[in-house]
Amino acid sequence: MQDSTAVNTKMFLLDGSFVSGILPYTDYDTVAKHPLWGSNLLFTDEEAVVNGHKDYIKAGAEFLTTNTYQASIEGFQKYLNLNFDQSFQLIKKSVAICRRAIMEENSGRTVRIMGSVGPYGASLCDGSEYNGNYIGKIDLKTLYDWHKPRIQALVEAGVDVVLFETIPSVDEADVLLNILSEFPNQKACLSFSCKDSIHLSHGETFASAVEKFWSSDFKKQLIAIGVNCMDTKLITPLLTSVKTENVDFIAYPNGGGVWDAVKKCWDNTQKYQISVDDLNLWSKKGLKIFGGCCNTDATEISRFRNLIDNLPS
């Protein structure tokens, strides 16, 4: 995907939660309660990762996300006892694993690879990606140095699109996109975490963030901008709040329920069922890439495939 206009003709389906997708092949604690949030499986259980990816391809996903949301050089050094080069290569391996899944599944469809780049706050394992409280406490050069090798590894491995996801603040997004500009031929999506129907997790408005990045030179490399890891009911007001014209959006909400940070599990007593009417409305607002975040598995992605296929032409 070298042309940002490639997303303008239809709505594309992204995969779902890595954790939910991998659970048929490993136990919950190995993934969701590990400090590396499942990226450790790149090192310890490649077959499980491949199988999780293949299930999403079977479900109809057109974008497959690398298992690198929580991956970092420092994290792999600390929790997997790897050196810098081994950690760098393991991040690159995530792309090769996606390619293997695509080849083995042989769906006959074009399936592109998105290289997941989560926020610095995720590595703190304290929910900081949902408030951005570390912004202002950590200098931007430190953020740059932490993110640069993980982005470089994904670019070198040949991802179609880099996916900056669950980003809580404009400042961190700015750091990420400045790193991206060092790889001028690389396309990317930028997706924020939001605390309500107007604001990013750190407090800036979503509308101002879209205006800042979609109306700047960064747009040359962005194929979509949007939100993830939030309540589905926030999508409509967030997209509607944007006054910037001709924005291509990406959105992939949580599957429902409320995350219990203490017990590290989901309370699924509250769920919203996404309908074709929802997707039709969001499509009119400019939504081009849709999928699922936490608590969304291959079964739900298959349902989304059916909804997208039944959108009015």
Image: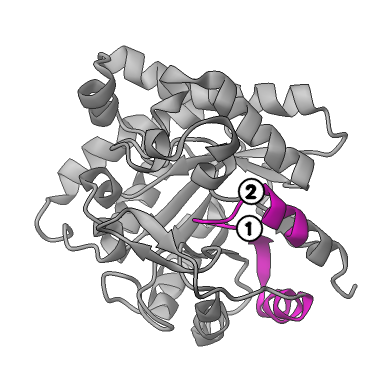
Q: Nearer the viewer, residue 108 or 293?
A: 293
Q: Amino acid at mark 2?
A: Asp
Quadrant for the N terminus in the image:
top right
- Classify mark 2: residues with Cα within 10 Å, few (<14), some (14-19) or many (20+): many
- Classify mark 1: residues with Cα within 10 Å, few (<14), some (14-19) or many (20+): many
Q: Nearer the viewer, residue 299 or 111?
A: 299
Q: Secondary structure at mark 1?
A: loop
Q: Residue at x 78, y 47 (%)?
A: 60
Residue 296 forms part of the magenta stretch: yes
Compared to 265, does 247 lie above or below?
below
Residue 140 forms part of the magenta stretch: no
Can residue 271 be seen here? The reply is yes
Give the residues drawn in magenta, as a range: 276-304
Distance Cα–Cα, label 1 vs label 2: 6 Å
The reply to whether dot 1 and dot 2 touch (C-beta < 8 Å) is yes
Q: Which residue is mark 1?
A: 291
Can residue 181 be seen here? The reply is no
Label for residue 66? none
Query: In the figure, residue 170 lies in which quadrant?
Result: bottom left
Quadrant for the C terminus in the image:
bottom right
Label for residue 15? 2
